[in-house]
Amino acid sequence: MEVHKQLFAYGIFKVIYAPQKAFKEIAQNPKYIGPILIMILFTATNIGSIYTIISKTYIEQTLPTAEQLDNWTENSTLWISTPGANISENHVDYISGIYYGNKSIEFSIDSSKQILMQLSNIGPVNCLGPDSYKDLSLRIKWISPDSKPENVTLYIFSGNALDYFYYNITQFFDSSTSNIWNNLTIPLVTGWLNSSAAANWGNVNGLKLEFSWLETSNINLLVDGLFFRGVFKSPVENVANYLVNFSLISFMQFIVKWVFLGGLLYIMTRAFKAKTVWRPSLILVGFALITMFIQAVISVAAFSTLPTLHYRLEFLGGVEGESKNAYNEILEKTWLVSQINGYVEIAVIFWTVALCAIVTRLLAELSWSKSFLIAVVAYFVSMIAQSFILGF
């Protein structure tokens, strides 16, 4: 209660509902404490805003991690295949995206009905429990033969070669023709058969793919983008770093706008031969930026209505088409909040310009037309300066 009294005593809230009267009172005894309190309120509210967003954001974790890219399908030496088969790295035909490196693994064998590819020593990978990986994603393209494989079986190893899970994944292929990348996302645990009771989803350390066709042919296929996925974590675990960085950004945003806007109003009024004094001009402009605090408060309220946002591999991976579709899904969930913030931003611009015009008329005793002209030019030039200095 005492804090509210102090804020009203400094005229901070009075600027909102009675700006002309508040500015006249402040001009009689200008003190920097008012704008400084507004800056603190703005920064604190912005911190609340970013925390609200972070608490509703969940980012999909993958193995390999984003920093490792799709490491398992970048290095051919990690794989073994059918005796007589050739394993190589294809630098021409691969999935292009942020997570996907610049190559795929190519497997080929002549005059055969089947081919296998096995990846070992990748664990232990935990696929059992609420915080474990839930799915396995990979991309597969067969170049030859032309027909779809008769059977494709995926094996997940646990401990040793005798303890494994297996699943017929033929139905997961989107295409029945060759030379098309098939994007497979296969659920783990549910629907799988096991070779022994010792097979353990909590200790996965390898996998194998077996492809078979009805007729003998030259087999050539590519594998890319192999990830365990399905774990979502909120950045709130590292919230302290975000809040410190964002508080510094908010502080700089207020300071830059305050100094540039106040400086421009002072210079422009002096250009009109008004006897404006620097200190009152800067202090009154600082009070006018109460609008930034109001905008931040509305943003917190708007962000609190957001649903939980899941940023999946499709969004993060950067594959053309997939990333855009995933981005559009996020936009649908955040559309209303974005619209509210957009309209509020426009309203705040007009409001701030009006308050700056009142300050200009009060201190420089210029006409309303000149006061609004100065306020408009000063405000938008200060926005350009902010964009140049802070990047937004």
Image (tube, helix red, strand yellow):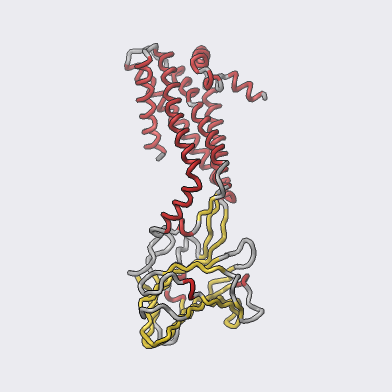
Instruction: Name the image quarter holding the C terminus.
Output: top left
Q: x, y (%) of residue 321?
A: 39, 58
Residue 288 visible in this rendered orientation of the protein: yes
Between 65 and 342, the one nearer to me in the picture: 342
Q: x, y (%) of residue 378?
A: 37, 25
Q: x, y (%) of residue 121?
A: 53, 75
Q: x, y (%) of residue 8?
A: 59, 20
Residue 74 visible in this rendered orientation of the protein: no
Vertical placement of residue 122 versus 45, above or below: below
Name the residue rendered at 41%, 26% in the picture. 261
Between 378 and 193, the one nearer to me in the picture: 193
Between 156 and 67, the one nearer to me in the picture: 156
Q: Residue 49, located in which quarter of the rendered image?
A: top right
Name the residue rendered at 44%, 59% in the picture. 317
Q: Residue 301, located in which quarter of the rendered image?
A: top right
Q: Residue 224, located in which quarter of the rendered image?
A: bottom left
